[in-house]
Image: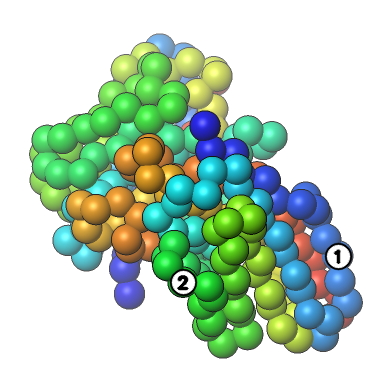
Amino acid sequence: DVKVTQSSRYLVKRTGEKVFLECVQDMDHENMFWYRQDPGLGLRLIYFSYDVKMKEKGDIPEGYSVSREKKERFSLILESASTNQTSMYLCASSLNHRQGMEPLHFGNGTRLTVT
Amino acid sequence: KQEVTQIPAALSVPEGENLVLNCSFTDSAIYNLQWFRQDPGKGLTSLLLIQSSQREQTSGRLNASLDKSSGRSTLYIAASQPGDSATYLCAVWTTDSWGKLQFGAGTQVVVTP
């Protein structure tokens, strides 16, 4: 079974802090994604990556950056956390460079609270 | 822009009844459609993936159909159980938006014993 592991289930950070959310997958997947999920807004794509050191902006990249130095790891960085970034963050991965040909697998999520 | 709609937003059924969940999308130029399950406070679990060339997929009590021309997919869950209580989301890959899986808002299902 594919395993996508997010390093923290819950995080509480202060406004202005730099926050790192880590995601690791164990199936040699090329594609990795970061989403946030908010009530009433559903899932929104922040960033995705289809290869090491490659990144593409999603629908809501403002206030975030990402890093993919190794194929199995995709990090989401909040440079200066703000209260409107309080949310559930979900990491996902999929096999294959060609979009849509393989299912997307999600981690269990990180519930981030910024106070 | 692709829009994905799931109606109803919430559904409650007695145990044993069959569940029918609907998903509609506006742009039929899709690679595939995927159904997910989400338990409260957890991530999404992939249930079924239907490629654009397929009409249906089955896994155990789950069956998903796809009608690309009418922009619809239906997830059937036979003989529902309380453990099926969760939110079910559908998502589509559209051919002109690489990497951007478009999600519906989900249908929250409660199966009562």
Q: Residue at x 72, y 55 (%)?
A: B107
Q: Residue at x 58, y 56 (%)?
A: B69
Which of disc 1 and disc 2 is earlier in sequence? 1
Compared with residue A66, is residue B49 higher up or lower down, i.e. above or below? below
Q: Nearer the viewer, residue A107 or B10?
A: B10
Compared with residue A66, is residue A49 higher up or lower down, i.e. above or below? below
Going by the image, does B50 lie left or right of A73?
A: right
Q: Secondary structure at mark 1?
A: strand
Going by the image, does B95 lie left or right of B111?
A: left
Percent across and percent down for residue A69 are 11, 39
Q: Label 2 belongs to which residue?
A: B54
> Looking at the picture, do discs 2 and 1 lie on one chain?
yes
Q: Nearer the viewer, residue A53 or A12?
A: A53
Which amino acid type is shown beneath numbered disc 2? Gln
Compared with residue B34, is residue B103 higher up or lower down, i.e. above or below? above
The quarter of the picture where residue B88 lies is: bottom right
Q: Name the chain under label 2.
A: B
Regarding residue A3, the answer to whether it shows in the image is yes
Tell me the number on the disc at residue B78: none
**Contact, CB < 8 Å: mark 2 with mark 1?**
no
Percent across and percent down for residue A85 are 50, 23
Q: Nearer the viewer, mark 2 or mark 1?
A: 2
Q: Label 1 belongs to which residue?
A: B12
Q: Name the chain under label 1.
A: B
Regarding residue A88, the answer to whether it shows in the image is no
Going by the image, does B106 lie left or right of A16?
A: right
Q: Residue at x 59, y 72 (%)?
A: B64
Which amino acid type is shown beneath numbered disc 1? Ser
Quadrant holding the C terminus of chain A: top right
Q: Secondary structure at mark 2?
A: loop
Q: Nearer the viewer, residue B25 or A88?
A: B25
Quadrant holding the N terminus of chain A: bottom left
